[in-house]
Each structure stands twice: as structure tokens, then as C-alpha cells.
Image: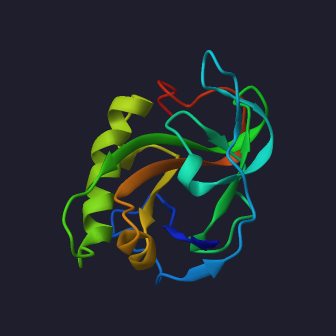
Amino acid sequence: MTMTAKNLTVRWMSAVSLAAGAALALSACGADEAKRDEATGEITAAAEADVFSLQVGDCLSVADVTDTQVQSLPTVPCAEEHDGEVYAETSLSGDEYPADIDAQAEQFCVEAFEPFVGLAYESSTLGAGPLTPSEVSWENGDRVVQCILMTEEPVTGSLEGSAI
């Protein structure tokens, strides 16, 4: 089975484009879906989760993630220390891979930031960035853009409404 990667870029307090790296096709499956509570959908155990299984509200431990193309990300229950959280999601349209995918994703993530955090992106100490389809995952039907918050220091609980 061939897995594809998604592009991940997070910038700290930057008004410039959150550009993502080039797409890669990666082979072999290395991660599963996050372990979730059936009733709430919340993550119940730390795991390396396939990026295609991430959901809004998932908490992540991404401080050590240095790749710009990722197949999986480390997830944790939000009650445990973490430094990232998926805070918004949208789907793009079109048959052709958008030349301006980075700009579209950045605009969406900045617009979704204040309603989630409770503070304008430019005033926050949080970092944010998009997880976008790579060219290869786009060819396979992936149109989902997810926005990820990052903290410099680990936190517990959701960052929703944190106004930091």
C-alpha cells in the first residue's frame, strides 16, 4: 500500500505566507488512526496517528517534528501535556492542485484563529500553520486543510478560548 504525505508548516507570529514544502510520495504504512473514546471522539491514548485520521480538537506533541511532509503525527489526550492542537478544518475544491494552496490555507487558518483562541493571531503568543494536501495526496482525492496551533511550552487542556 502506498501512503502519501501532507505538507506541514508552522510559523511563530509571522504575517508572511506559511509556505509548505514540496510534495513527496512515501511508501509503507507506519501509523494508525488515533485511539478514541467512542462516545466523545476524544483521543484516549498517546499514539503516532496517520495524518488523514486527525480531527479538529486533537492534541499533538509536535515539538520534535522537523519534516515538512508528514505521514503521521504524535497525538495525545488533551489532558496530558502537549504543544499542538488541530483547531480548524476546511476542504478546498477543484481538479487541479492550486498554485496558491499555501495562501488559501494561510488565509483560512488566520481567519479561524481568533474565533477559536479568542485573540487575534497578530496579538497571540501561539504559533499556527496549515497541514495541506501534497500534490500526490491531491491527486488521490485529498482536499482537506487543517490548522494547527503550537505553543512554545507544553500545556494541558484545549487552547480553545485561551486568549494567549
Q: Relative to residue 6, is residue 116 depicted above or below? A: above
The picture quadrant where one finds residue 119 is top left
Total marks in image: 0
Q: Residue furthest left?
A: 94
Q: Horizontal placement of 17 versus 70: left or right?
A: left
Q: How is the image coloured?
A: rainbow
User: Which residue is nearer to you in this view: 7 or 41?
Assistant: 41
Residue 15 coordinates in the image, percent (x, y): 33, 62
**Can you say which quadrant of the picture contains the N terminus?**
bottom right
User: Which residue is nearer to you in this view: 136 or 131?
Assistant: 136
The picture quadrant where one finds residue 57 is top right
Q: Residue furthest top?
A: 39
Residue 46 coordinates in the image, percent (x, y): 80, 41
Q: Relative to residue 57, is residue 74 depicted above or below? A: below
Residue 154 coordinates in the image, percent (x, y): 74, 42
The picture quadrant where one finds residue 133 is bottom left
- State the residue at coordinates (38%, 55%): 145
- State the residue at coordinates (39%, 28%): 118
User: Which residue is nearer to you in this view: 7 or 129?
Assistant: 7
Q: Relative to residue 79, is residue 92 depicted above or below? A: below
Q: Horizontal placement of 6 versus 38: left or right?
A: left
- State the residue at coordinates (60%, 25%): 41
- State the residue at coordinates (72%, 58%): 63
